Structure formats: C-alpha cells, structure tokens
Image (cartoon, helix red, strand yellow):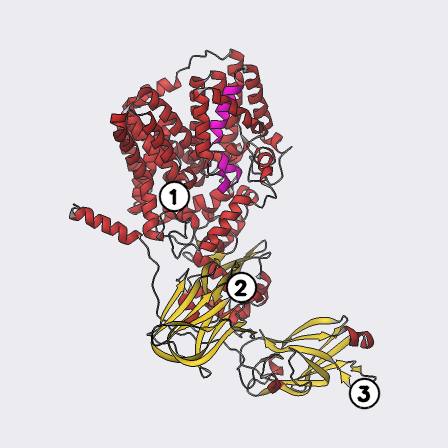
Amino acid sequence: MIRPPSFALLAAVVCAGCSSLPDSFPPPPQRAALIVPPAAGLGYFVDMRDPNSSAYVVQGIAERTEVPWRWAYEHPVLRFQVPDAGRLKFTLDFSLPERTFRETGPVTLTFTMNGRLFDRARFDTPGQLHYSHPVAAEFLNRRGENLVAIDPQPVWVSKADGGKLGFIISRAGFAE
Amino acid sequence: MQPLAILCSALFTVAVATGVGGLVLREACEDLAVRFVAGAALLSLLVFGLCSLGLAYPLVFLALGAVLLWPWGGGSWPVLRQAAAPTPSTGLAKSTKWLFVLIFTLYFILYFFNAMGPESSPDGAAYHLGLVGRYFRDHGFHRNPDSIYAMIPGGVEMLFLFAYAFGRHSAAAMVHFAFLLALAWQVFRYGSRAGSRVAGACAAVLVFASPLVGVDGTSAYNDVALAAIAFTLFHLLQIWDARRRARLLTAIGLVAGFAFATKYTGWLAVPYALCFVGWKSGRPIRLRNLFTTAIPAACVLGPWLVRNWIWFHNPLAPFFNQLFTNSYVMVSFEKIYRHMQATYELPSLWQIPMQVTTYGSLAGLLGPVFLLSPLALLALRRPAGRQLLAAALVFGFNYFSNIGARFLIAPLPFVALALALVLSEVPTLALALAVLHAVISWPTMVTKYCRPEAWHLSKVIWREALRIRPEEPYLESHLLYYGVDRMIERSAVAGSTVFTFKPIPEAYTSRRILVEYQSAENKISGAILWTAFVPEYAPTWRLRFSFSRQPLSAIRVLQTGSGESQWTIHELRVFDEGRALPRDSRWRLTARPYPWGIQSAFDNSLATFWMCGSMLEPGQFVRVDFGQVKTADAVVIETAPNQWGLHLQLYGQDTAGQWRLLSPAPLESDATRPLGLRRAVAEEMKRRGIDYVLAFDADLGSDDLRGNADLYGIRQVGEYRGARLYQLP
C-alpha cells in the first residue's frame, strides 16, 4: 500500500515529468497584416503570371498568355499603386533573348516614373536579367497611380513585318 | 593578489573535496587522489543543492567549506604525511626515477602556468564557464531553455562554481588541473601495484604528457575530470575487490553517479560499477552491496535527471527528444547535431587513428605513440590487463557518437596502462616509449607534425599566469571573439539579451546570449530573421487547396513527403467563396510532431510561422477544429519555398464526423514579397525578448542588416572587427 506522503511525492514527480503533447491551442490575437498586392485591382508589384496582371499594363506590352512572361515593345508603360511604406526601389525581372540580342547588341533601358526620368541602365549580355534601383520619394505619387515607362534602345525590328520587340518582362514593381 | 586568489580558491575547492572524500572513505582508502575525486562527487551534489536553493554565494561556499574541512582537519595530517612520505623505490633504478621526476616536473610547470593563465579555451569560455558565471550572478540555478549546454548535467561545473566564486575563471581551470594530477597519480599507483613501477610510471607519462590531455586538463573543460572519475571508479572497484569495505561501495556509487553527472558519455559507469559489484559479491550479500552502491549513485545523478525532467520535460535533455517530446529542443536539430558529432565531416572513419593521435584535426591529438594502442591487447594475458581493457571498452563505448579526440580521454588511461603493462616486460622499451612520448608531446615539438588547427598548448605562460602581463591583451589575442564580448559589455544595456548565429565566449559577458542553434526557440528566432533577407525563407509560396463548397467541422493538412527540410506554415487560411473565415475563439489548432508554435500560423503575421520540428516524414499534420460547422471551399497556406520534398493533402471532417480527402494536392503559386517584412521581423524578434542582434560581416544577410537598417528600424550601437551589434526597435 502506498502511504499518502509517498503517493504525493510520486504524483508530483509524475505530474512534473510525464509530458504529454499539448492537445490543441486556440487562435492567438490577430496581428496587423503586412502590405501585399491585392488579388484584384492595382498594387505595388506585378508578376506576369498573375491573372490580374493586365490591370497593370497601360501600353506596349503583349497580351497575357499561358507562358509566365510577356513581350515588351518599343514603349511599354506599367502602372502601380504604391503604398506609403518607407524607402522603396523599383525592380524588374526581364530577359534579353539571344536571338534578338545578336542583332541589337547591348540594350539600354530608360526608366521614367510619372513622366520624370529616374534612371538609365545598359545591359551588355543576353539572358535573364535583374534590375533594381532606389526610387526617391519625390518621384512617387503615394495617393494615386504611378506610371512607369521602360523604353528599350535599340529595339529588335522584324525583317518580315517590321514589328518591334524590346525585352521579355516577367516581374516588375516596387520592393523594399 | 589575483594569482593568490586563483591559487587559494582552487586549493580550497580541492581541499574541501578531499576532506569530504576523507569523511566518506575514512580508513578504507587513504589515497588523497581517490579521496579528492570521491569527495568531489559529494561536494558537487552539495553545490547543486545550494544552487537549487538560490544560495550560491561566496560566503555560503566559504562556510560550507569550513564546516566540511573541520572534522577532517586534525585527522588529515597523518594521511598527508603518509602521502608525502617517500615511496619505496623498488623496481626503479635511481637514474630512471630521476628521469621520470624530470619529465613530470617539466610538464607540471607547463600545465600549472597554463591552468593558472587567463582562461581562453573555446568551450570553457563559451559555455562551461559561461553557465558557471550565470549561476554565480544569479546565485543559483534558473530554468534556462536558451541553451542545450544548460541542459547537459554539470557535475564538474558545480566544483568550478565553488572555485569561481573566489578566484573566477582560472580557478575553475585549476580545479580541472587537479583532476589531471589525481588521474596521473592514480595511474602510477595502480600500475605500480598491478605490474611494476616502470609500468605505472610509463603509463602515467603516457597520460600526463599527452598533448590533448594537457590542454584539456588545464582548461575549464570536463573531459579529463571524467577520465579521472572513470579511473577512480576502476581503482576503487579494484581496492574494494581486495579489501571488501562497505565504505568503498558508497564511494563507488558516488563516483559512478558523478561520472554520469559530469558527462552523459559517462553513463556506463553506473552499470559497470553495479555489474562489477554484483559479480564479485557473494550470493547472500549481493543485493545489499548493490543497494549500497546504487543509492549513492542515484543521489548524485538523480538531481540532474529530475531537474531536466521538471524543467525540460526530458530527463536526458538535450537528447532523446523523440522519446521525451518537448518544446525546447527540436528533433531535427538533434538529428543534425548527432550526425555532425559522429562524422566531423571526415571523408572516412579510417582517418580517425591518425587524426586523433598525430594530426589533431578532430580537436586535438593524444600523441603519435598511441598508434601502438593495438599492442595493449596483449595485456589480455593478465587479469589486470583484462580488467583494464574491459574498463577501456566501457568508457570508450560511446566514442563513435562523438568522434572528437576529447572523447577518447576517458578510456585513454586504461589503454595507456594496458600498453605499459605489455611493454614493461622489456623495461627499457617501456622507458624509451615514455621518453619519446614526453619529447614529441612538448608544445614546440607538436607543432612540427600536427595540423595547424589542432588544439594544444603553446608554451609556459608564467607571466600571464602570475598576471605580470595583464589578462586583457592575452585574451584579445588568444580567445576568438573576446573583443566582441567587450564590445557587447560596452554597448548593450545591462540585463539585455543578444541574439547571434555564432557562439561567443559567454564567460566574459554578463549579457544573456542566445545562440541560434542552441535551442528550439533560438532556431525559430534565427529562421524569422532569415525571413527578412534569404529569398527561400520569405513567405512568397502559396499552396491552394480547392474543393467543392461543403459544411465541415474540421480540416486536417497531412504531410506525406520525405526529405531533409522542415515543414513550415506562415499562415493557414480557410476560405468560403473567396472570403477568409475569421479565426474564431472556438477554433482549436493541433499540430504534430511539434505542436508548439502552431498559433504562429494563425496570427495573421507573415513574419511568424510554425515549424514542424522534424525533417519531413509522412504523417505530420496540422488540424483545425472549428468547434462548429463551417462552410468552406478552399484552404490556402502561405509559406516559404524552402521546403523541398513537401507533399500535402487536405482532409475534411464532415458533419457526421467522417474524415474525407478534400484535395490530394494543392495548386502552387508564387506571391510577391510583402512590404514592411524587415520591420515586422525586427519587431517580432523584439517581441521574443531579444534586444540586440549580433551579426558578423561574414554571416548570411549581414550586408542586408547593414544596408537596410532603416527598413528594419534597427540601429548599430557597436562594432568590433566586423562584428556589429544592432539594437532592435
């Protein structure tokens, strides 16, 4: 027979030691959400795979297809809604295909934001490329739309029909 | 004054331990080395008790020491006189004797000054004394889930604390040095009895002059202490076998338990002692002898197990976490840790003999002469040889769980003695080997053949030991990141918490240091920080399960893949016709295998996440019980793309309580990185109790912290040679 003090000691040891996994937890208090691009309408970043990506295109970019990228032509323009989120940079994931690059050579992209030139960058190699450049606050319209034009120079001109191709755009927009 | 304080505090600790050992053993064994080790077990237990009561104060230690020394005081002198009396020199020629005296004297001088010098050993300064310093500042134990090292039993560290209270870091190292002296002495004494004085002296030289034993035994480590404890246990068992005194069994139990309490790798000491006593006892008294041995052993090792059980829900923390599930150490960490310790990234285990004896890339070298260890098998012809080799097997049993050379120190004395017994059949050969070992183990010789990274002593640092040269410049040049400690002390507010990916010498800072790999919470904090700057850790992966709209009482996401990554969920949302269901207080969240932290997948923050705690294995799941019937048609998991091998299925529980497969696989897509993520990460780190982040320029993401400090809202408050301290917002 186990006497009470022994039992108490035994129970204390067992309770303290025998850890079973906690069963379940309630949901915690909800935190303020971070800023992410909305599923519909305009946000600060567009991926050409998104079903909503055409909302960001003002002009000069091919229609959305099954592939996760689109051709940008001679004077592509995108639009964004930029939140008030501190220091930002404009980023662009794009490609210069080997085939067009062979004829155009190095391509210079001229970036204009809300009608103001904010950067010019030259790309000397074909393939997948990444561009990133800080954007000064005065270039941005924090309340309304922001138009970003990305003009390639030179563009590739089709000998067959005279069509002009600039670069292949995958993703573009603002990031920290 | 400082050298005197170091010396006196170490001597006081050793004297108290020896006195306690005298009380335990009395006339059953008068060997001071045996008494010291046996008493150390009991003193360690007493200090443990004081720490548990929050009474770890110098005055309390002083009073305890005085009380324990009092009854021993008068009676000790005959023992001391006996110990100091010249031993008969039979079996040793005078020239040979003086040769051994010369070797021991030279190595004693080397070791004494290194032990007394500023403590600059990597682990000693990082956690052995880091923890001791924390116990001292807190006047005892506190539940410390921040570090796996705080979970490992610290039997010898309790003695370090006793000495540290008066003489600080070097006093602790001096206590460890006392274990080395006790070991060498006992090897000599036992070898002299079992074989010849030449055998005993040669074996003692083999152990004492070993480069790794020297550097470890003069640092605030515990490997040499474990070896001394193991050998004392062996020695006591042999004495008991010859004399059969009950007191010896008590001491055997204490010492066996102390081996376990010193290092988990010493766990076999207890079954070894019990088997020996049981085997050698006659049938009628067998049980009583076993109890007399087992109870003291349990008293010494039990408190550590109970402490871990209560605090960490795992008596053997930080190991066996799959068996004793707990929130403090993840199973995935244990798996990686065990693998690293078992391989050290060696291309082949066949490299071990050369590495541990000669090259030293496995954290030190025992000495090239130990390549002759296989010859020790010839000692099997003698009873003593069989006893020694059995003990070597017992204390080397765990070696392949950690192939660092330090883990061979415990079986080393047994191998050295067995080897010496064999070689002493031709005394000149044994003598030549001992002299060769002594010559090629001297620091200036060691550098000629070991690898540059091998851990060994470099010279006699008597000026530093006597503090003729100040500590600061020595530590600056000999202890990695000591300057970082100083910078933290200058720049971080007292009582604050610093997070870092790299361990730093915690023994020289009073700030609370959280090292990324050292606990589950720290691992999560590290992964949260990586979320800000490692693209694979950013919450940009979306997994969408779509199914026909239906009433459900619960959902379960089941993981069926295998792989080396971990399943994480930043947010899990349940949708009905495009609208996320609000997280109701009636919801109940469950996760396996690591249930803790699942709330982070339901807090609406992409800076926090649940980690499943183990590598990917089929059967892991997350379940949401709605507490009522809810209509839903989709579940979306927002997570990071660093989960190669992840395969998820979605199950739903209908109103009848039946579980059905709702979707065999999710539709995967990428999402844009949220704005404000860095700031959210910094705020989350702060919320987790971290005040500063210490980043080294070579660390992953350190450039991001430096270049985007404004986006994080952090401020660099200190810098030391590429180590930057950032204060969180």
The residue that mark 1 highlights is B153
* Badge 3 element: loop
Q: Residue at x 57, y 68 (%)?
A: B708
| Residue B675: assigned label | none
Q: Are marks 2 and 1 in contact (CB under 8 Å)?
A: no
Q: Residue at x 40, y 34 (%)?
A: B10
Of badges 3 and 1, nearer the viewer stands 3
Rendered image: mark on residue A161: 3
| SS at mark 2 in the image | loop
Query: What secondary structure do most residues of the magenta stretch adopt?
Result: helix
Along the viewing direction, whichever of B176 and B347 lies nearer the viewer: B347
Can residue B709 be seen in this snapshot? yes
Which residue corresponds to the image point at 51% horizontal and 77% vertical from the top-left? A35
Amino acid type at circle 1 is: Pro
Density class for disc 2 (Cα within 10 Å; few <14, some 14-19, many ≥20) is some
Q: In the displayed structure, does residue B377 sit left or right of residue B624?
A: right
- Indicate the quadrant where residue B352 lies: top right
Q: Is there a contact, CB below 8 Å, between mark 2 and mark 3? A: no
Is residue B1 within the magenta segment?
no
Q: Which residues are magenta?
A: B399-422
CA–CA distance between discs 2 and 1?
Answer: 35 Å
Residue B276 location, quadrant: top left
**Residue A7 position within the rendered picture, expressed as x and y whole percent measured from the top left:** 20, 49
Q: Please say if B62 is above or below B316.
A: above
Instruction: Residue B180 in the image: state x and y as whole percent.
Output: 45, 30
Q: Which mark is residue B643?
A: 2
Crowd tier of the residue under label 1, counting other residues whose Cα lies within 10 Å: few below 14, some 14–19, many 20 or above: many
Q: Are tags 2 and 3 found on a single chain? A: no
Tag 3: amino acid = Asp
Residue B388 % position (x, y): 45, 26
Spatial separation of the CA atoms under disc 2 and disc 3? 47 Å
